[in-house]
Each structure stands twice: as structure tokens, then as C-alpha cells.
Amino acid sequence: MSDLTDLYQSVILDHNKRPRNRGKLPHATRVASGDNPTCGDQCTVYLRMNGDRIGEISFEGAGCAISQASASLMTTQVKGKTVAEVQQAYAQFQDIVKTGSAPDEFTELAAFAGVHAYPARIKCATLSWHATLDALAQPEAVA
Ligand code: ZN
């Protein structure tokens, strides 16, 4: 079990050290921002659809390690997904961070299971997901 904990911790550390899809996305057609005033986290999500799927996604943000690592991991998890699939992934992620129980099949999202012990940090972990869902709810803008 401690091997698994180490693995999950290394996922978070790795996303902090080498954030994926960080920076403004050129020609983004949807942008949404969110903040988490209790911790001081900010996150802006840029995306471009490809048909009914997320074609490209990136984020810009500042804040605690959990919020930034979660945003980085989130972008790798939702790229190529439909809105329904993103909602499903978010429901799974929410379940993980609220209950601390990981699903049977391996998912890097379970790296955030430890957050459930710190209820105030759940908002840190879910901030970027909220921004993405807000962006997905927008009408497509002209690039
Ligand atoms: Zn935070």
C-alpha cells in the first residue's frame, strides 16, 4: 500500500514540477476562470473543440501545489473527451477527493485521494475542473 502512496505522491510532484498543457492556448474558442479565495488559487482554462470533443486544452494558474498539479493532470485526462465524458470523469474525481476511496481500475486521478482528509483542500483540487465545465457550457466563440 505504501508503494501505491509513493506512486500517487510522485504523480502530484511530477505534475508540479513539469506542468502539462500550461500556458495560453492560441486560438482558444472557450475560456473560463475560477478562483478559490480561501486558499488564493486561481485557474484559467483555455480550450478548443474538435467536433463534440475537446481538441486542445491548456491552463494558466497560480496557487498551491494541489491546485496546480490537479489542473495539469485534469488537462491530460479530459483532452479528446466529450462533454458527457468530462462530466463523468469529474464525478469520479469528486468521489475520490471527497471519500478518499479509489476506483478499482487504475486512474492517476486517485493520486488526489489523500485530499479527502483535508476538506478545505477539496476546492483546490476541483477548481480547474469547475473552470473546464464552465468553459464547456459556453457557446463556441469564433476563433
Ligand atoms: Zn489551494
Image (tube, helix red, strand yellow):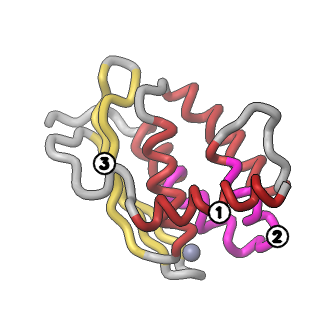
In the displayed structure, would residue 88 be above or below residue 63? above
The boundaries of the magenta stretch are: 110-129
Residue 68 appears left or right of 99: left
Q: Position of residue 99 (x, y in %)?
A: 85, 54
Earlier along the polypeptide chain: callout 1 or callout 2?
1
Residue at the (46%, 76%) spot, across then down? 63
Q: Which mark is residue 9?
A: 1
Vertically, is 132 above or below 137? below
- In reply to whether residue 120 is colored magenta, the answer given is yes
Magenta portion: prevailing SS class = helix
Horizontal side, residue 141 vs residue 128: left or right: left
Q: Callout 1: helix, strand or loop?
A: helix
Residue 32 visible somewhere in the drawing: no
Residue 107, percent from left and from top: 66, 39
Q: Secondary structure at mark 3?
A: strand
Using the numbered discs, state the Cα–Cα distance from disc 1 to disc 2 in whole angstroms: 15 Å
Residue pointed to by mark 3: 46
Which secondary structure lies at badge 2? helix
Label 3, label 1: how far apart the Cα atoms are: 27 Å
